[in-house]
Amino acid sequence: MDSPLNGLDVSGLEGFLDNMAEVHERWAFVVTAEYRVAIQTLASLSLVSSLLVLGVMLWVRLRHRSYFKRLSLRVSGYVALADLLSAIAELLMMNTDLMLRQSEHGLRFILWLSMFSSLLFVFLTLCMAVQLHLSTLTRVRVGVYMKLEQWYVPLSTLASVVLPAIAVAQMKGIMWVPWMHAFNWPVDAWKRKLVLWSCHFVWITVTVVYTACVASVLALVIRRMWRNSVDVVAEPRAPEKWDWARLTASVRPSEDTMASDDTELSHDTVSSGSTLHDVSRGSGAKVMSGYVLTLVSNDALTGRPIAVRSYVDKTRFLRSVQRLVLYPLVPVITQLGVVACNMTDEPSRALYIYGTAMSAASGVFNLVVFLLNPALPEIVAERVARRS
């Protein structure tokens, strides 16, 4: 979300000026009209994509407020805001005349905005990966990881504000280097790298590695679950607050299943996963595949709470989880090039272009993932049902 060259070693002005001609020739494409138009186009598309997501989120909040209980929807809104700010910062940095007219405080603010927006996006998707990890790959109690949801956005925002502030506070004498499209300030190379890596790039690197691992392991787990629902999971555990009624099909309650309290859903009483069959008998019986869980409902005659055995539809459940797995993949796609550029003192031109282009287009990728959110088809189906 910020220029990969912001982390390169362009300090040591005397040595830098001695090699200015070589550097200018190597990175001349950065200031060409074609390159600038390409990056500005991607940033503009990212900005428009972010505005679309925010618009849909506003509509959902006004018309379908109950869906805001879902972590993925709330994260999508804040990620869209981060993408919007990142696109604005990118467009500002592509305006050379504007950047050269900025005071030191102006340059610090633009760099802080760029770092803040990228870290906010990174931390929010990291939180989504943590939620998927805890809910699908561990045996942590449902109540524990559900309670963590309330801390994800505040902690991500706090870290995204503080870390860039610490970094820009160290950048005395900051300047804009137009022929490299990067910030620079007079300081030893190792100090510069220490500041940028400790306050920015190390967090992006950790997120890219962690989210890639979570997405890969989840892909393998889901693949096994598609093949067979027996001995794969002990119970269907939702990674966020889903409406289980849309994923279940109730059957007749068994004998002696009187519940002791009137809770909505007891995740701990869900039986082990198994291949299920419809309750109908005889030839032509429909075969169902999924998992069994216990929902607590009130008896129609007595009003007393009873435990109802229900099927969790395997196809709907796994497709919903699959779509959520896409969230951790976005930082891998958009930030991998940025990390790779800053792990070498002399990145190749192709690597630099890849890192800058993917970072500038992050809003477009997040729009695609947002449109695949399992909540949106449910909202559309709900509105169609109301009109019919």
Image (cartoon, grey):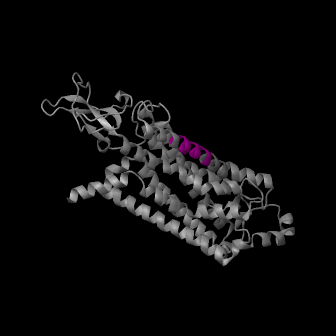
Residue 339 visible: yes
Residue 241 visible: no
In the current view of this chain or complex, which residue is farthest to the top?
Answer: 256
316 relative to 22 in the view: left or right: left
Q: Residue at x 54, y 54 (%)?
A: 330
Query: Magenta span: helix, strand or loop, mainly?
Result: helix
In the current view of this chain or complex, which residue is farthest to the front?
Answer: 283
Q: Residue at x 48, y 47 (%)?
A: 325
The residue nearer to you, when weighing 312 against 59, is: 312
In the picture, the quarter occupied by the C terminus is bottom left
Q: Residue 222: x and y, percent?
A: 47, 41
Q: Residue at x 74, y 73 (%)?
A: 28
Give the magenta range: 208-218
104 relative to 319 in the view: left or right: right
> In the picture, residue 243 is in which quadrant?
top left
Taking the magenta stretch, the answer to whether it contains residue 190 is no
